Image (spheres, rainbow, N blue to C red):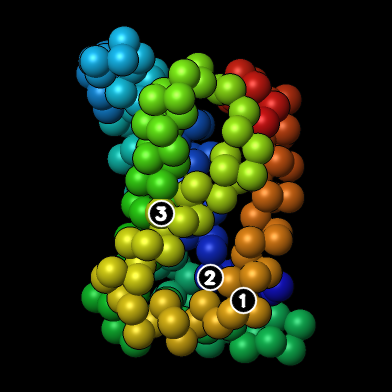
């Protein structure tokens, strides 16, 4: 579980940072599709995407530069064997997580769900799917050597719990309009 949390930190941090630092011009520019619904909606902004991505990348690079770390006697894996590979991995996790979230926003608009409407299970794992997909494309050897089946299963189990907890905190702080 510790390794799962460690490896996902660059993917976990972009969404709350996008909510915290976002706002402004929506990525879809306010455009709608033929179905009359917005492409993504006002919740996906350029500033949020950039800020969230940068926060995830910066955190990932800080974790890389910390070097060999042990927590509870567990050696935590590195995000790469060079600055370039670590940047590629952390950028893939961070940007991929936001793309996964945006992809699900697109799907939710197509099925008639309004901004903030819950889609249990999917809302909690869409960003994981995006982060993993982009990282598999850019750094397959790193991904498969670190996200073993037990680590991947731990991510799938703990992520919904973390997601719900952080959303409630964001709601209480006034950063989010809904507690889910």
Within the image, what quadrant is residue 178 found in? top right
Q: For the C terminus, give its image quadrant.
A: top right
What secondary structure is found at the residue carrying circle 1? helix
Q: Is residue 78 above or below residue 156?
A: below
Pinpoint residue 25: horizontal percent, then vertical percent.
28, 19
Mark 3 → mark 2, Cα distance in angstroms: 14 Å
Q: Label 3 near label 1: C-beta < 8 Å? A: no
Other-residue count near label 3 (Cα within 10 Å), few / some / many at <14 / 14–19 / ≥20: many
Closer to the N terminus: mark 2 or mark 1? 2
Residue bearing mark 2: 7
Task: Give the residue at x 59% y 79%.
Answer: 149
Closer to the N terminus: mark 1 or mark 3? 3
Q: Which label sits in the foreground, 2 or 1?
A: 1
What secondary structure is found at the residue carrying circle 2? helix
Task: Give the residue at x 62% y 65%.
Answer: 155
161 vs 14, nearest the viewer: 161
Q: In screen coordinates, is 111 left or right of 28?
A: right
Q: Label 1 near label 2: C-beta < 8 Å? A: yes
Mark yes or no: residue 22 visible: no
Other-residue count near label 1 (Cα within 10 Å), few / some / many at <14 / 14–19 / ≥20: some
44 vs 37, nearest the viewer: 37
Mark 1 → mark 3, Cα distance in angstroms: 17 Å
Q: Which label sits in the foreground, 3 or 2?
A: 3
Residue furthest to the right in view is 72
Number of residue marks: 3
Residue bearing mark 1: 151
Mark 2 → mark 1, Cα distance in angstroms: 9 Å
Q: In screen coordinates, is 37 left or right of 73?
A: left
Residue bearing mark 3: 130
Task: Give the residue at x 69% y 87%.
Answer: 74
């Amino acid at each position: 579980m510790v390794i799962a949390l460690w490896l996902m930190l660059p993917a976990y941090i972009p969404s709350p940072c996008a909510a915290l630092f976002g706002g402004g011009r929506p990525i879809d520019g306010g455009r709608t599709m033929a179905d009359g619904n917005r492409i993504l909606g006002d919740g996906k902004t350029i500033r949020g995407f950039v800020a969230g991505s940068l926060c995830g990348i910066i955190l990932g690079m800080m974790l890389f530069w910390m070097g060999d770390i042990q927590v509870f006697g567990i050696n935590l894996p590195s995000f790469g064997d060079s600055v370039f590979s670590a940047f590629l991995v952390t950028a893939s996790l961070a940007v991929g997580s936001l793309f996964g979230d945006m992809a699900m926003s697109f799907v939710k608009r197509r099925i008639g769900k309004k901004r903030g409407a819950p889609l249990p299970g999917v809302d909690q794992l869409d960003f994981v799917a995006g982060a993993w997909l982009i990282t598999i494309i850019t750094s397959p050897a790193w991904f498969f050597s670190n996200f073993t089946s037990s680590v991947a299963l731990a991510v799938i189990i703990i992520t919904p719990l973390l997601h719900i907890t952080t959303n409630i905190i964001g709601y209480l702080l006034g950063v989010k309009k809904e507690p889910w």
